[in-house]
Image (cartoon, rainbow, N blue to C red):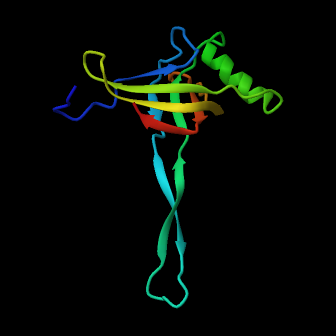
């Protein structure tokens, strides 16, 4: 499907391999889709006018997802809490995460796959009795790499 207009950033869906259930893929924000080629500067002996910039490898930022807090019966929450609570006492279970940017007919315009992802951080936003806001949790995932599918 060709796009004749810029895609809206507010209509997206998430899927976690091996995790299903209502609300487990409902997030209000996804960020951290960044790939950066790291470089190293090398000085050549006798050449003082410039430096060589050489590629080292690709660096990926963590995938950060935000949503309203759900019950602890959530499969996603259980996976995250088990990974963060047990540390390295048990093997970390990795999962692929799929992020799709959708059009107005719920069809994917673009899809990215985050390979071998696992949770590295869980945060609950400040709880304030003076405000009438929704309790929001932030989940952060490391992964090997992501690719456009």
Query: Is 119 left, or right, of 56 in this rendering?
Result: right
Residue found at the far left of this picture:
4
- Residue at x-position 47% and y-position 25%: 98
Q: Is residue 138 shown to the viewer in this render?
A: yes
List x then y, in percent, for residue 53.
47, 70
Q: Quadrant of residue 4?
A: top left
Of the 4 image quadrants, the one containing the N terminus is top left
Residue found at the far bottom of this picture:
46
From the viewer's perspective, is residue 17 above or below residue 144?
above
Q: Is residue 122 shown to the viewer in this render?
A: no
Q: Quadrant of residue 78?
A: top right
Nearer the observer, 89 or 127 = 89
List x then y, in percent, for residue 111.
38, 28
Query: Is 44 left, or right, of 100 in this rendering?
Result: right
Nearer the observer, 26 or 14 = 14
- Residue at x-position 20% and y-position 29%: 2
Nearer the observer, 51 or 32 = 51
- Residue at x-position 58% and y-position 39%: 144
């Amino acid at each position: 499907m060709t796009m004749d207009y810029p895609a809206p950033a507010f209509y997206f869906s998430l899927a976690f391999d091996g995790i299903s259930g209502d609300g487990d893929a409902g997030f209000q924000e996804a960020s951290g889709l960044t790939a950066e080629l790291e470089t190293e500067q090398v000085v050549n002996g006798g050449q003082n006018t410039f430096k060589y910039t050489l590629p080292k490898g690709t660096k990926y930022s963590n995938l950060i997802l935000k949503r309203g807090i759900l019950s602890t019966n959530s499969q996603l929450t259980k996976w995250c809490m088990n990974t963060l609570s047990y540390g390295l006492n048990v093997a970390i279970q990795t999962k692929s995460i799929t992020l799709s940017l959708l059009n107005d007919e719920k069809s994917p315009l673009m899809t990215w796959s985050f390979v071998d992802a696992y949770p590295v951080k869980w945060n609950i936003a400040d709880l304030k009795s003076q405000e009438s806001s929704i309790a929001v949790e932030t989940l952060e995932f490391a992964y090997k790499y992501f690719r456009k599918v």
